[in-house]
Image (cartoon, helix red, strand yellow):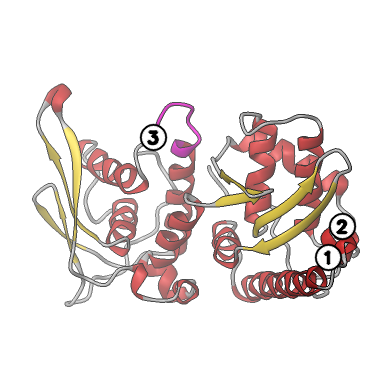
Amino acid sequence: MSEPTPTAPIPTSNDAPVFDLNGTKVPLSPQERGVYGWLAGQVYMNLCKPEGVPPLQGLLAMMALDAARQDVTNDDPRVQAVLNVLWQMGIAKVRTEGEGADARVSWDAGTHASIGSRPVIEHFTEEGAREGRALAAALMIATSRQVRINGVELAIRPVNLELLQAQGVELQKRMQPGKEDASLTAARYVAELLAQGATDKDLRLRAALELAADLGIRSMLVDAPSRQLRIEGFNEQAAVAAAYLQGLTGEQFDLALKRIQTLNQVAQETARRLAEQAKTGNTKAAAIAPRAQAQAAPAGVATPVKRRRRD
């Protein structure tokens, strides 16, 4: 288990949840946000590997079991963070079955309440961050995102940080601060790559789609030859998860939430207006010039273009 900047564990209360780690009962305690940032980085480094990776729960389970094999104690903040996140995902037990080449990792759900028992936004609080609810929700959302382009669903597959940063620079070059929201810049860049013939196997397009998803884009229509586009809808949960993973807190986080809610309202109103115009035979309304959506975000609202830390 690689070294983060460790923080002291927060004392365990008498009614703390207890996790079963390969037959050992481990009382869980809340942890500081910094160790969850370390864990998010470890998860993403594994998700970016070219070879196949296990499901998110399996990846976390293996991290917990590896820590024990490396003689990391169960009250270590890193182990506690991993187990807290698993617990918040509804898992109460992790174990190794078999030996040698036949060994495999398995996990069992518990009867306790998981993150699915509350609205997603309720997890992104100081308490939710310390309990692991915020990271559990953010990772579940971030690893299941899709962007729909012209009716085709494209899964967001993480790429390595260097490639993502390089595409972020390309995005920055195309931004028009004060004139359009960053999501529209990202959508235009995706349209530009498609016009160049990029497919979902193109790493540049994959990175551009990941940035677009971080900015909340859920669905868009693109006419690649003319580079005309319209953002049909936004994923508020994905944008909030990205804001958390990028380390936004307090007012910054609230502004990011306000931004995506405003963008979604504008997209929904645009869709309603187009549907009404289509009924009256106004076919010219089928496409919206990019600048028509440029004023969606309120002035001063944060647009999360910096990437999450993965170190």
Residue 48 among those drawn in magenta: yes
Give percent across and percent down for residue 40: 46, 50
Per the model, the C-alpha gap separating discs 2 and 3 is 38 Å
Q: Amino acid at mark 3?
A: Val
Q: Residue at x 48, y 43 (%)?
A: 44
Q: Nearer the viewer, residue 160 or 64?
A: 160
Q: Nearer the viewer, mark 3 or mark 1?
A: 1
Q: Nearer the viewer, residue 271 or 266?
A: 271
Q: Are marks 1 and 2 in contact (CB under 8 Å)?
A: yes
Dot 3: what SS? loop
Q: Amino acid at mark 2?
A: Pro
The magenta region covers: 46-52
Q: Residue at x 58, y 36 (%)?
A: 159
Residue 55, relative to residue 181: is it above or below?
above
Q: Which mark is residue 290?
A: 2
Of label 2 and label 3, which has the lower sequence position? 3
Per the model, the C-alpha gap separating discs 3 and 1 is 38 Å
Left or right: residue 222 versus residue 260 is: right
Give percent across and percent down for residue 82: 32, 53
Which residue in the protein does label 3 denote?
53
Q: Residue at x 67, y 57 (%)?
A: 215
Per the model, the C-alpha gap separating discs 1 and 2 is 6 Å
Crowding near pointer 2: few (<14 within 10 Å), some, many (20+)? some
Q: Residue at x 22, y 76 (%)?
A: 13
Residue 138 visible here: yes
Which residue in the protein does label 1 denote?
293
Q: Nearer the viewer, residue 154 or 103?
A: 154
Q: Amino acid at mark 1?
A: Gln
Q: Nearer the viewer, residue 213 or 131?
A: 213
Name the image quarter holding residue 165: top right
